[in-house]
Amino acid sequence: MERKQLLEKMKLLKLWGMYRSFQGDLYQSETDRYTPDELLGMLLENEWDDRQARKIQRLITSAKFRYMASVEELIYDEQRELDKNQMMRFAECEYITKRQNILITGSTGVGKSYLACALGHQACLKGYRVSFFNLAKLLARLKMMKADGSYLKEISRLERQDLLILDDYGLQPIDNQSQLIFLEIIEDRYDRKATILTSQLPVSSWYEVIDEKTIADAILDRLVHGAYRVNIKGESMRKTRKRVNQNNN
């Protein structure tokens, strides 16, 4: 079969990794140096790598992170009290396989959302399904979905995510209907999937956000039990990053 016909069949079969390899470097190299098995192995390896790269990109795009962050770019300033060894353990994503939660707290600007996005991005690189939401906006959207009939479908989608990141808990009061929605989300995920929650409030103050105490108990017991806690301290990251950049120049 001629090269042009082979390329056309690869396109029809959507073997894009093989297609680009056979069209590019592999075709231009001395292919007669390889046995048929070696040549096929190289083509399959390139196809595998290409599919994995496209899968990861789909996962990252679907997650809709607030920041394009990575664990390699985290700043371990002494004032922040961020444990590098702990972050490296989180980067292995074992907490996801064990269905554990991470609670990230700290004052405004210290990098809570950035850290959550970095961990989420790392999870995508490992092949996990991740979704990032501002909690208040998510609850408001789900309330609207109850009216148009799409609520159950979205709740089911949230339940399937390997990692759900809920940003800015406690930034706004949670009304009665939203409290029940929040409970349903957490109940569906409890001991089944991992969740990351960020908040300006210390965990000890989280009960105050939910005025119905029985619901507060139900939500927070499921969130906090067995969860990792990361309390970031120090000044605003805007100042820290500016200082680090100046030192590097």
Image: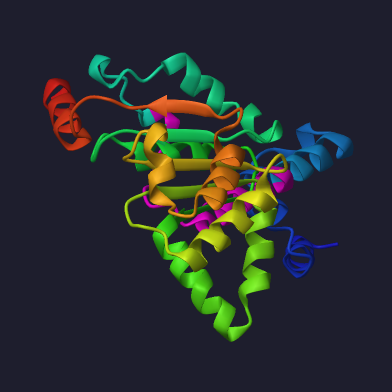
Quarter containing the C terminus: top left
Residue 238 percent coordinates (x, y): 17, 37
Report the front residue among 82 and 127.
Answer: 82
Tell me how many marks there are.
Answer: 0
Relative height, residue 18 to residue 223 (above, below): below
In this view, the residue farthest toward the bottom is 148
Instruction: Give the left or right position of residue 142, taking residue 82 as reference.
Output: right
Q: Residue at x 72, y 52 (%)?
A: 18
Task: Identify the image quadrant of residue 8.
Answer: bottom right
Report the front residue among 51 and 47.
Answer: 51
Residue 66 percent coordinates (x, y): 38, 52
Report the front residue among 85 and 172.
Answer: 172
Residue 80 percent coordinates (x, y): 28, 22
Q: Residue at x 64, y 54 (%)?
A: 20
Q: Within the magenta stretch, is there residue 5? A: no
Task: Identify the image quadrant of residue 116.
Answer: top left
Q: How is the image coloured?
A: rainbow
Q: Residue at x 32, y 20 (%)?
A: 76
Task: Identify the image quadrant of residue 23.
Answer: bottom right
Q: Within the magenta stretch, is there residue 69? A: yes
Instruction: Give the left or right position of residue 21, taking residue 65 as reference.
Output: right
- Residue span colored magenta: 47-72
Residue 49 percent coordinates (x, y): 67, 43
Residue 68 in view: no
Relative height, residue 199 to residue 88 (above, below): below
Residue 8 in view: yes
Quarter containing the N terminus: bottom right
Report the front residue among 21 and 210.
Answer: 210
Instruction: Give the left or right position of residue 183, taking residue 32 as reference.
Output: left
SS majority, magenta: helix
